[in-house]
Amino acid sequence: MTIGILGSGNVGGTLGTRWARAGHHVIFGSRDPESGEMQSLVARATRPDGRPSRAGTFREAGEAEVLLVALPWMATRAVLESFDGLIDKVLIDATNPVVPDLSGLEIGTSSSAAEDVAGWALGAKVVKAFNTVGYNIMADPAFGADRPVMLYCGDHADAKQIVRPLIADLGFDPVDAGPLRQARLLEPFALLWISLAYQQGLGREIGFKLLRR
């Protein structure tokens, strides 16, 4: 599968690298795809056949089958609205609308970043995922015999069927949390991870598990 990555920071770089190493074709979108930083990233994101990923413009990344949005929240709207339209594109929204000091959210429980993203990415099939743990857990989700849960939500069943195995590819337990409006719960849940890691002193090497019986 071809996956376009909008945002080459910690989250986008980590997920793109891991998907490439799982055998997917990854295109990292950037305002400056020829920069040394981007070339270093694509060299690390090597597929099992030894071929590196590639860097391109945001528009080139948007031509992939699946698009991951891992941009800083304040930059997200402008980038998505720069596309002419993303009709039927499967778009994974990994953003969190946190305020700069990580003390809260710019958008509360009456709406969500994911719903805004769906409005800006015209025609896309948005799935909220990869927003409830830190990038270090995305890089290595191994907790012995346990797998941390990765909750996701969206309004399109076919899009969720595509995203679910992409979550499982990385070693998470994928759990469908329902329609896209459930992002109103998943985004504050991300704030819980942040507060436990930092304010409560548990550190970043933590995840959540869903127990079933």
Image (cartoon, rainbow, N blue to C red):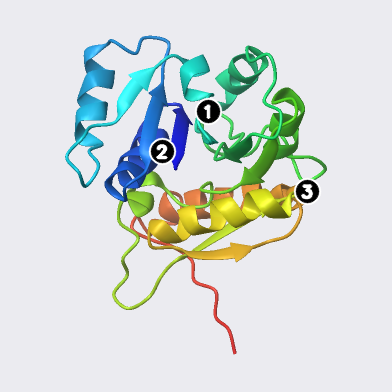
Q: Which label number is shown at residue 181?
A: 3
| Mark sitting earlier along the chain (3/1) | 1
Q: Quadrant of residue 5?
A: top left
Mark 2: which secondary structure? helix
The residue nearer to you, when weighing 130 against 187, is: 130
| Mark sitting earlier along the chain (2/3) | 2
Residue type of the residue flagged with mark 2: Val
Q: State the CA–CA distance, disc 1 to disc 2.
A: 17 Å
88 shown above or below 191: above
112 shown above or below 188: above
Q: State the CA–CA distance, disc 3 to disc 1.
A: 24 Å
Which quarter of the figure is the C terminus placed in? bottom right
Q: Position of residue 80 (x, y in %)?
A: 63, 20
Query: Is any part of residue 202 visible from this angle?
Result: yes
Residue type of the residue flagged with mark 3: Arg
The residue nearer to you, when weighing 10 against 6, is: 6
The residue nearer to you, when weighing 19 against 204, is: 19
| Mark sitting earlier along the chain (1/2) | 2
Which quarter of the figure is the N terminus placed in? top left
* Crowdedness near tag 3: few (<14), some (14–19) or many (≥20) residues, C-alpha within 10 Å: many
Q: Position of residue 24 (x, y in %)?
A: 37, 43
Q: Are marks 3 and 1 in contact (CB under 8 Å)?
A: no
Camera-near label (3 vs 1) is: 3
Give the residue pinned by disc 1.
Answer: 100
Q: Residue furthest right?
A: 110
